[in-house]
Image: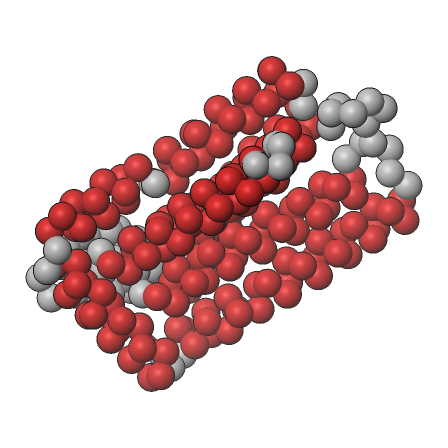
Amino acid sequence: MPHPPVRRRALLRAVAFGAGVSVPVVVLAYLVRAEAPGLSRLDEQTVVVATSFTREHPGLLHVLAVWQELLRPIWVNLAVGLVCLRLWRRHGLPTRALWAFLTVMLAWALQVGAKGLVGRARPVVEDALEHAPGSSFPSGHAMNTAAAALTTTLLLWPLLGPRGRVVVPVVAGTVTVVTAADRVLLGVHHPSDVVAGVLLGTAIVGASAIGYQGWRPRPSTQGAS
C-alpha cells in the first residue's frame, strides 16, 4: 500500500492535471454563457460550412448518421464495461478494471451536469440534417468517446506489446476525432462544444489515472494490479 506522502503527491498531481486541462473548458463555458460575439460567429459559420458540405454528399451523411448511433454513450460505455469485465476475469486485474469502469461512469455523469450548468442551445441549422435533444455544451458524444478511448488505452496498456502500444492509441485517437467531427458535420453541435468535450473527457481520465497510480496497492507480482 502506498505511503501517505506518496498518496498526497499523487492527489496533488491529479488535481493539477485535471485543473490545468480544464482551464480552456472553463474559458469556453464563460464565453458561451456571455454570448461572446467572436466565438458565436466562428461557431455559427463553421456549422454552416460543415453542414453544407455534408448536405452535398449524401453518402457521407449516411455514414455520419450511422456513426452517431454506434457511438452513443450507452453503447460506448457498455463496450468499455465488457472490456473491464473480461480484463477482470481473464487477467485477474479487478482493481484496474474497476478503476476504468468507474472513471468512464464519472465522465458520463459530469458531462450531464456540465450540460445543465451551461445550458447552451443547439445550433440552428436551416434544413437540419439531424436533431438532438438536450443542451449543446459540452458535446456528450465527444466527451464520452474521448474519456472511453483514453481509459481503454490506459486500461490495456500493461497487456500490450510494442505494436499494440502504437495501434491502440492511434485507433483511440482516430475514433475520438471522427466522433468530434461527426457532431459538427451533422450540425448538432458547435465546434467549441466538441473541443470542450474532448478536453473535459481527457482532464477527467488523466486526473483519475494519476490518482489511481498513486493510490492503488502495489502488486506483489507482475500483473496483479
Going by the picture, which residue comes out furthest to the bottom? 37
Q: Residue at x 40, y 53 (%)?
A: 177
Q: Position of residue 34 (x, y in %)?
A: 40, 79
Figure coloring: secondary structure
Q: Position of residue 128 (x, y in %)?
A: 13, 59
Q: Position of residue 214 (x, y in %)?
A: 79, 43
The front one of 35 and 24 is 24
User: How many discs mark residues in the rendered view?
Assistant: 0
Going by the picture, which residue comes out furthest to the top? 90
Check the image and report above or below for 216 versus 31. above
Q: Residue at x 23, y 40 (%)?
A: 66
- Quarter of the picture containing the C terminus is top right
Asked whether, in this view, residue 85 is left or right of residue 15, the answer is left
Asked whether, in this view, residue 43 is left or right of residue 5, the answer is left
Q: Is residue 108 visible?
A: no
The front one of 80 and 140 is 80
Asked whether, in this view, residue 181 is left or right of residue 86, the answer is left
Asked whether, in this view, residue 142 is left or right of residue 45, the answer is right
Q: Residue at x 55, y 21 (%)?
A: 85
Q: Position of residue 193 (x, y in %)?
A: 38, 62
Q: Residue at x 22, y 56 (%)?
A: 186
Image quarter of residue 78 = top left
- Quarter of the picture containing the N terminus is top right
